Structures are given as C-alpha cells and as structure tokens.
Amino acid sequence: MNPILRRLSILGLALAVPFAATATDYKVGPGSTLGFSGKFQGQQFDGTFGKFDAAISYDPANLATAKFDVTVDVATAKTGDGDRDNALPTPDFFDASKFPKAHYVTTGFTRDAKGGVVANGNLTLHGVTKPLALKVAFKPAAGGANLSVTGTLKRLDFGVGSGEYKDTGTIADEVLVNGTLNLLPK
Amino acid sequence: MPLRSDATRWSTVAKTFHWTMALLILGNGAFAFWMDGLKPSLNKINMFALHKSIGLTVLALFLLRVLWRFADRRPPHTPGPRWQMVAMHAVHALLYVLIVALPLTGWAFNSAHGYPLQYFRQFNLPAIVGHDEGLANVLIEVHEYLFWFLLLLLVPHVGGALKHHIVDRDDTLRRMLPFGRAKRSTPTPPGDSA
C-alpha cells in the first residue's frame, strides 16, 4: 500500500469509526404515521400521508451525528373528506403531478430552553424550500426506537393554496405537521 | 311605530320578524339554487357557508319570535267560515314547523356529511348528528323538499292574505304590511261590509 493511500485509509477509518459507533441508523417500520393538521372554517382536520420514507440516524448522546432525511408522496394525503382529498393533489394545492415529493433534510440539532431536542432542517414542498424546525422525542424500544416529531409551518410560505385558496379566513395558514415513527435498525 | 301589537295591527316588532324572516327564508332558498350551480371553488365553499349562516339566523330569529309572541298580544283573527279558520291555523302551524325544520335539516345534513359549521366566520357550532354519508344523502333531499313544501304553503298563506285584501276588503293584510295602517278600527265580520 503506498503511503498516500495508507494515510487516506487511516483518515477514513478515523472519520468512519466515531460515526459507526455513535449514530444509529434506522429505517421506517410498520405502524408509522406521518401527518398534518389544518383548520378549515374554524375546525381542525387531520390528514395522513399514505406513502413516505425516512432515513433516520439518531443517537441521543451524540446529536452532532443525527440526521433525518424524509421523502413524502404528497399525492397520498388523506383527510377523511373525499372532496378535500380530491382537491389536495391538484394545482390549487400540492400540484402533485409537478411536485410529487416533499423532502425534509435536517441541517443540525439543538436543545431548546427546556432541554428538549429540536431538529432544524429544510423542507422542500411544492417546489419551495424553507426552514422547518421539529420538536423531537426519541425513545429506544425493543428492536429499534420510537420517534415522534411535531412542528408548525405556514402553508402559504410554500405556495400551498393558490389563487382564491390563499384566503386564510377559510383555510388557516398554519399547519401542524407530525410524525410518529416506529424505527427499525437498518 | 307601536312596539306591541294592538287590536287593529301588528306591532313593529312582529312585522319586522315576519318580513325579515320571509325575506331571509325565500332569499336563502333562491340563493341555495344559485350557489348549487357554481363550479367547485373556494367561492362556492364560502357561498355555502353564507347560506348556512343565514339559515342559522332564521333559526335564532324564530326562537326570539316565539318568545316575543308569548309576551305580546296579537290582533284578533279576522272572523271567517270554520274551514277557513282551520286551514289558516294549519297553514300557520306548518309554516312555523318548516321555519324550524329547514335550518335543522340543513344543520343535520352538514353534521352527517362532516362539514364544519361556522357562523359568519365568527364561531363554530357543534355537529348535531354523527358522521354518516347515507344519512347525509337523505337529509339533503329532505332539506330541499321541505323548501318546496314551504313554497306550496305560501299559496294559501299569500292567497288568503290577498283574498282578504282584494275580495273581502278588510285589514288582514294591511295590518301586517310594513307601513300599513288599518282603515277600520275593528275587523269586519263577513257579510257585514258597509
């Protein structure tokens, strides 16, 4: 092995070993949900995405190595109302044929004043990328872990609701996002 | 402008209830047929919300109107043949039932379908029946048929008033008209017209 290669391999090991030792990689297990809550005519409605995937690296003891990478098929949103579910994928809202996926990637993790973990990241939705912070609750469980996240976004920041649907008097701007993931080791 | 009814005419309050509700109910009915034809849009949703708010207003006005009727006197019925008196009471009773049943079936349909119910964007009202699409489909039909029934009842209601006014030439209609004044101080029995 020539000296440069050896040096590189040592460097590689030096970098890789701490990662392997601290962050634990997970995939999404059955029973996981990813959803949102909005307000229509003053009444809350709850939706879930039928199809999404997430790669989660998380070790509560080493947040520097944690990372969430979540991809959501926005056309699979279901809210318990046929008219609304038909409207959501159209260009009036998600425009799912043009922007089929929403994507969330963390950029770093911090702790809030109460010591709770906050994931900071960027959400790309409807072709628009904006920062989104999520509160994180992580609990190791038998054969994996339970992860729940909640956050709030403004739908109009992402251009969800075009034309007359920008009216926040009928459809509130604020949307709560939530996820409850049953994580399995990768 | 008398606040309370007397022997010759309805009070301003009673007239206001009668004509405001007549306008709201018929207007809301016509409005419903118009809004139903709109293409799906937020505007259509907002128009439905307006229809619901007007209907709830009718329901609230009805409750106030009934309370007022208990407190107020009313001018005596214009005497007439027994069958006319029976018909008049039946039509009035049915109109009152419909004034309540129309908003309530609308509210029940709204609840059964799972729609929110917001009063003029101010506050929300609860569902009065559980989520049930089958029931919702029945209730919306009932809601519409009740309106047709109400229009049918306007034939004897308006027809009777016009008959009193034009044929009998008495004050039955005039005493309910917004700015109407009774020409005679007492109702005239039939066959006694001077």
Image (cartoon, rainbow, N blue to C red):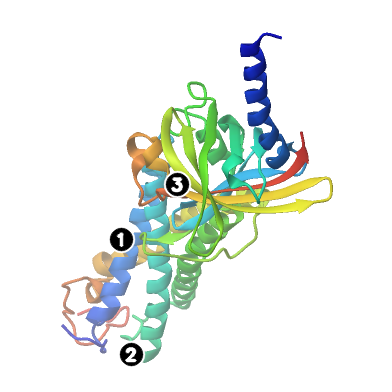
How far across and down, in percent of the image, does residue B181 sit? 16, 77
Location of the N terminus of chain B (image quadrant) = bottom left
Which chain is disc 1 placed on? Answer: B
Q: Which mark is residue A153?
A: 3
Task: Name which residue type carries label 3.
Answer: Leu
Mark 1 crowdedness (10 Å alpha carbons): few <14, some 14-19, many ≥20: few
Q: Judge from the rendering whether residue B121 lies leftward or rightward of residue B134; answer left or right.
A: left
Q: Secondary structure at mark 3?
A: strand
How far across and down, in percent of the image, does residue A172 sit? 41, 51
Spatial distance from mark 2 to mark 3, Cα to Cα?
A: 59 Å
How far across and down, in percent of the image, does residue A122 sit? 47, 37
Q: Compared to B109, does A9 lie above or below?
A: above
Q: Judge from the rendering whether residue A2 lies leftward or rightward of residue A162; answer left or right.
A: right
Query: A183 or B103: which is nearer to us?
Result: A183
Which chain is disc 3 placed on? Answer: A
Task: Name which residue type carries label 1.
Answer: Leu
Q: Secondary structure at mark 1?
A: helix
Query: A41 or A96: which is nearer to us?
Result: A96
Labels 2 and 1 positioned on one and the same chain: yes
- At x 29% / y 67%, what residue is drawn? B20
How far across and down, in percent of the image, does residue B73 sit? 33, 90
Which chain is disc 2 placed on? Answer: B
- At x 59% / y 38%, what residue is drawn? A67
Labels 1 and 3 positioned on one and the same chain: no
Residue assigned mark 2: B73
Residue assigned mark 1: B23
Q: Residue furthest front?
A: A3
